Image (cartoon, grey):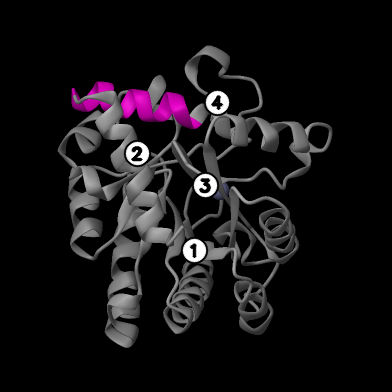
Amino acid sequence: MEYRYIDVHCHVQFDDYAHDQEDVIARMKENGIGGIVVGVDRASSERAVALAEAHEHLFAAVGVHPNLVGHEPFDADAFRALAAHPKTVAIGECGFDFYRTEPTDEAVAAERAAFLAHAALAAELDKPLIIHARPTKGTVDAYATLIDAIKEAQAAHGSAVRGDVHFFVGGVHEAEALFALGFTVSFTAVITFARDYDAVIRTAPLDRILSETDAPYLSPAQRRRERNDPLAVEEVVRQIAEIRGEDLEAVRAALCANARRLFDI
Ligand SMILES: [Zn+2]
């Protein structure tokens, strides 16, 4: 199908959509929105693959979220099998969360080991990573750890270790370090009400930015407390064009092409 937008990070497999999942997915299609349905553990990754199999405009990512690493160790064989599906386009979400999981030495070591295992599988299968990195409040600590871990993975596996850092909340310095390693960053509808990311959005090369919603989380300003859905990707793209002071149609086309290139959609 002809895509106008790609939401590179949504969770329409979650129970939040139990009563209207088919309706949300149909409205995505009507609006020309493709979506990557991202797993956070094995069960939600299996549901992501099932949705991608059932719908032309949905794709899957399979992995274990850093907040869940302590509950579910990354089973590379199980995820290798899920990744074998032709609609699985990425490995993740994986990474580092120092906000909701206290970054004790033990917790960071576990997240790092899981991240490196995801990266090894992604390199083996030549698929990009979808990365979650959330620092402790007021810092960029998780990005420093992530950048170091990416360098370790690339030293072992080369430039096959690539991907997108989702819900980017770092600064220009962290973004530039990730771009230099071949990664993109993506933004949610948080940018419709928080101005903290304008400098990164303005200075990033256009081919390094992707659009996402992280639905059901992070609704746009007008409906901030409601459940979010991937249709909000249109507002994210509009906001990115506005912050950059660039033509909306040119930005829309570029962000769509960026996603299709990275995830081979
Ligand atoms: Zn997510």
Q: Earlier in the sequence, mark 3 or mark 1?
A: 3
Q: Is residue 109 left or right of residue 198?
A: right
Q: Which mark is residue 219?
A: 4
**Residue ranking furthest to the right:** 19
From the viewer's perspective, is residue 102 above or below residue 2? below
Q: Which mark is residue 138?
A: 2
For disc 1, the marked residue is 104
Amino acid type, residue under disc 3 in the picture = His
Circle 1 — which element? loop
Q: Earlier in the sequence, mark 1 or mark 4?
A: 1
Number of numbered callouts drawn: 4
- Gap between marks 3 and 1 measured at Cα: 28 Å
Give the class, few, some or many, for how many residues have Cα within 10 Å of label 3's Cα (few <14, many ≥20). Answer: many
Circle 2 — which element? loop
Q: Which mark is residue 125?
A: none
Residues tagged 3 and 4 counted as in contact (Cβ below 8 A): no
- Gap between marks 3 and 2 measured at Cα: 24 Å
Observer-nearest residue: 171 or 212?
A: 212
From the viewer's perspective, is residue 233 above or below residue 60? above
**Residue 239 included in the magenta stretch of the image:** yes
> In which quadrant of the rendered view does residue 263 lie?
bottom left
**Horizontal and vertical percent position of residue 62:** 60, 65
For disc 3, the marked residue is 9
From the viewer's perspective, is residue 149 above or below residue 258? below
Q: Is residue 246 left or right of residue 20?
A: left
